[in-house]
Image (tube, helix red, strand yellow):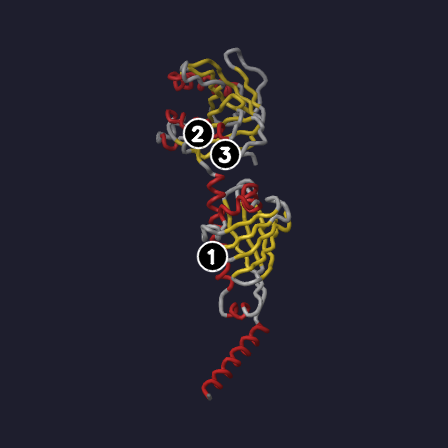
Amino acid sequence: MKAIKYLFFALLGIIALVAGLGLFAKKTYHIERSIIIDAPDSLVYEQLWLYSNFKEWSPWHNLDSNMLIRLSGKDGEEGFSFHWSGNEEVGEGTQTLISVFPKRLEFELDLVRPFKSKFPAYFIIEGDKTKTKVTWGFDPKFPFPINVWSMFTDIDIAMGSDYNRGLGYLKRRCEGMAHKKFNGYEIAESDLPATTFIGIRETVDTADIGTYYQENLPKIIGFIDSLELEVDGPPSGLYWTYDEEEGNSDMAAAMPVKEVKKVPKDFQIFKLDKGRALIIDYLGAYTGIGEAHRGMDLYISENKLQIIPPVIEAYLTDPVSEPDTTKWLTKVIYFIEPNPDSLAKK
């Protein structure tokens, strides 16, 4: 009997100790994790804002293939929620979108398992068209006696590891979307200023394009030097058509200049308006540049874009001073019509 009596008092002591610790143990924590993503803030924002995107990079959705999901409301609108119920790793609860701001999204988490608790969470989005910083924060609340357990656990590490993992998934997803390649080439979209070219335009057999440049670019450069005009960029090729079946191209060998009023009859002035353009930085010999154009064709087709001729090839590397063709840099530029449905539009 004495043993039972001692055991009883020991249990009472443990209960009293736990109860005492519960009075002093923290119940609320603040945890944040951040990451820098090499992608536009608009793209990242959509991955955070819409549940249809969130589930693709969430650190929990892949932990239970049989997890049950129930949606309520319209995705992306304040009040939208999703309820999940799964195995021990994911538990059960509801996340509700509370507030939508241009740089901040606020949620409420209502947990059922592994313990009952309700607390806020948020995303802060800071960035521009190239890089974005995402901060994922939350303020978990631990009711008694869970708060006693938290005294003996590094909560920041225990819970923050999931958020770190999720942000890593988000980074890979966004950067993969932002830097998707077409025929092996990454395509940038940018607003380009108006440009004036002096050039010589003809319909040229595709096999003779290289020779055409060699013959005409020195003439154009000589004319520019004779008038002491200010050059506004590298030698370029302007292409209004490129007919593979006929084997020819309506094109011009040209040089961009700051200003010119008139030219002799052997030359022409080409004024290109400012506009939205797609750009590929192509490295390599000119004989392989067709692969970059095929990449452009794939991008334009996928995004349902309309191009505005001429297509420009700007030759930034002087082949005379740089004999290594793998280092020759050419900017392939396609001007495009405004298209609000374009996936690439920022």
Numbered circle sitting on residue 295: 2
* Three-letter amino acid code at the position of disc 1: Asn
Q: Residue furthest bottom?
A: 2
Residue located at (56% from left, 52% from top): 83
* First in sequence: mark 3 vs mark 2: 3
| Residue 332 percent location from the top left of the image | 46, 28
Select label 1 or label 2 by which is in front.
1
**Which SS class for mark 2?**
helix
* Three-letter amino acid code at the position of disc 3: Ala
- Residue at mark 1 to residue at mark 3: CA–CA distance: 43 Å
Q: Residues within 10 Å of mark 3 (few under 14, many from 20)?
A: some
Can residue 228 be seen at all in this image of the molecule?
A: no
Q: Residue furthest top?
A: 265
* First in sequence: mark 1 vs mark 3: 1
| Residue 261 percent location from the top left of the image | 59, 18
* Three-letter amino acid code at the position of disc 2: Gly
| Residue 325 percent location from the top left of the image | 36, 30
Q: Is residue 240 above or below residue 65?
A: above
Q: Residue furthest front?
A: 1
Q: Quadrant of residue 208?
A: top left
Does the CB distance between marks 1 and 2 fall below 8 Å? no
Residue 238 lies left or right of residue 80; in this view the side is left
Q: Which residue is mark 3?
A: 188
Numbered circle sitting on residue 87: 1
Q: Residues within 10 Å of mark 2 (few under 14, many from 20)?
A: some
Q: Is residue 56 above or below residue 200?
A: below
